[in-house]
Amino acid sequence: MASGPARLSVVGAGRLGRTLARLWADAGHFRIAAVACRTPVAAAAAAAFIGQGAACDRLQGLEPADAWLLGVPDDRLAGVAADLAASGAVRPGCVAWHCSGAHDAGLLAPLRDAGAHVASAHPMHSFADPAASLASFRGSWCALEGEPAALAVVRPAFSVLGARCVELDPRHKLLYHAAGVLAANGLVALLGRAGELLRAAGIPATDALPLLEP
């Protein structure tokens, strides 16, 4: 890689992509090159939030980068990986990773075939409010898996943000994902049902959750 911060291009700069890119830019760990979204308006908004990067709404014509973050939704990952590989912007020796909690790095096979080292890195963190995540991301856990050459880049990138990294066997990615879904959604559903039972028992709705908090 060139001297100075490595060049990172973000493909899919939604809430997760723009937050991570901004954190890396602020830390001086990466220099943001391209910020790609499906529409020019979204790309411009993401680049403005990050404070770096050239906004674009297509993969053709992208300049090569040292590192690639694919922040697109899970159901688009395989297609975007194939399109990016076909764009000619991916050069041998670069690193590419996605942040899906359910899929392993194998989904980036087209990029690996183009010469990239691939990985997945899933932060156990809610990115619902990117501005809030800038302050709250430090201390989040991040599950990593992929090729050693990719992890040698990805692990330090998350560590510099204060993430606590753990490596997963890719065969167990779905178990990891199920645990996250259960904790994020199952607990809320369980508390909701418990509140219903308390209200049925005559406990005022305003007192139900405080009663359960201890």
Image: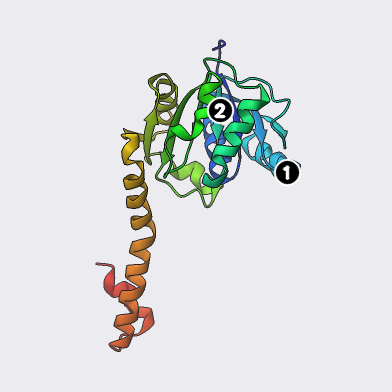
51 is higher (above) or lower (below) than 116 = below
Marking on residue 68? 2
Residue in the picture at 38% in, 80% down: 206
- Where's residue 185, x and y in %? 39, 60
Identify the secondary structure beneath mark 1: loop
Crowdedness near tag 2: few (<14), some (14–19) or many (≥20) residues, C-alpha within 10 Å: many
Marking on residue 39? 1
Residue in the picture at 42% in, 45% down: 102
Q: Quadrant location of residue 173?
A: top left
Q: Quadrant location of residue 67?
A: top right
User: How is this picture coloured?
Assistant: rainbow
Instruction: Name the amino acid, label 1.
Output: Thr
Taking the image as drawn, is residue 29 in sight? no
Crowdedness near tag 1: few (<14), some (14–19) or many (≥20) residues, C-alpha within 10 Å: few
Screen quadrant of the N terminus = top right
Instruction: Pick out the residue farthest to the bottom.
Output: 202
* Nearer-the-camera pick, 5 or 8: 8
Instruction: Name the amino acid, label 2.
Output: Trp
- Where's residue 83, x and y in %? 64, 32
Instruction: Pick out the residue farthest to the top.
Output: 3
Residue in the picture at 55% in, 15% down: 92
